[in-house]
Image (spheres, helix red, strand yellow):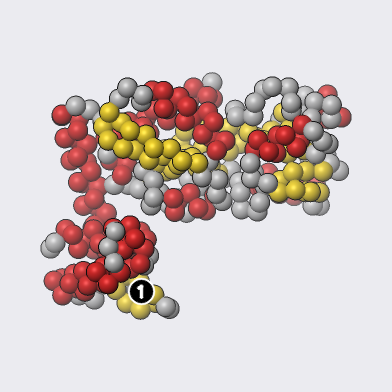
Amino acid sequence: MDPRHLELLRLFAAYGSVTAVADVTHRTPSAVSQQLRAAERALGAELLEPSGRGLRLTPAGEVLAAGGERVAVALEQVGAEWDAFRSGPSGPVSVAAFPSAGVFLLAPLVSRFADSGVELSLDDADVAESSYAELTREYDIVIGHSLTGPTPTGGEGLHVVPLAREPLDVAMAPGHRLAALGEVSPRDVADEAWIGVPPGYPFDTVLQAIALALGRDLRVEQRLRDNRLIEALVAGGDQLAVLPRFTTPDAGTVVLRPLAEIEPRRYITALCQPHRAERLAVRSVLDELRRIGAEAAQ
């Protein structure tokens, strides 16, 4: 059994098409198709079958793709042992984080690896919750968030490292009539105008929960993604918004008030493919992210 065939099937299971596998392996689709046919001849089984306009793994292909994942994990484990034997963690580690988590996680991370052999490559990714899992195909580590639990939607089967639980508060201008309260309830905010986020983004579930408690919809006048932009609009107007407690600047431009009865929090989590999680450099970065998250929550 050729390990290269197992790796090819593992990639097909992860990316879902010949074209996507060709892109990630820097080969042509025809070359990938030829290699898949060669794997079928060598293994004596049909590994792919038509599905709509594309292909999918047969049961035999799924067995071998799962085996390919175990082989990839084993190879990374050996590589980690070799790195530890030689000199410690080293090499490139790519990290994608949604911006508001990057504010308190990435600067300390860069500082702590500044004089090490680990080469960090950072990116920001403001996407819907269901897209974080997909990003693990492109990055070693993806930092996502969810309001329902440590594993964002679609993250099942990935290596999951909880980093922090961050309270979500109601933001308002300092002169807003509700700013005098120590906390606000759904009834307090029932008739207010809101700046929300697009449907599918975690913060939207907070507004849905408030609406459910009230038995009627809220008045959401804008839906935006960038927290800094939302802060600026809240500071200069009468609208409310849901913003994270750890990463909203305490500069007097907006005030945060806890939301009573619902008490929303978001789970901030690092995700990665199981085989990538075995690399010593990736494990070292994950360990440091866990420490930084714990420090922020204190």
* Left or right: 185 in relation to 126: right
Q: As drawn, is 111 to the left or to the right of 42? A: right
The residue lying toward the viewer, choosing from 27 and 213, is 27
Across and down, in percent, residue 146 comes to 55, 44
Choose top left, top right, bottom left or bottom right for residue 38. Answer: bottom left
Q: Can residue 170 be seen in this view?
A: no
Q: At label 1, which amino acid type do we have? A: Leu
Q: Position of residue 168 (x, y in %)?
A: 65, 35
Residue at 39%, 75% (x, y): give it.
54
Please tell me in which quadrant of the rendered image residue 92 appears.
Answer: top left
219 lies above or below 21: above
Camera-nearest residue between 172 and 216? 172
Residue 126, percent across and down? 55, 45
Camera-side residue: 34 or 5? 34
**Which image quarter holds the C terminus?**
top right
Residue 61 x/y as whole percent = 27, 68
Query: How many labels sit on residues?
Result: 1
Horizontal relation, residue 97 to residue 183: left or right: left
The answer to whether residue 266 shows anywhere in this view is yes
Residue in view at x 12 percent, y 63 percent: 1
**Classed neighbour count for the residue bearing mark 1: other residues with Cα under 10 Å, few (<14), some (14–19), many (≥20):** some
Residue in view at x 19 percent, y 46 percent: 75
Q: Mark 1 points at which residue?
A: 55
User: Which residue occupies 35% across, 48% down?
Assistant: 273
SS of the residue under disc 1: strand
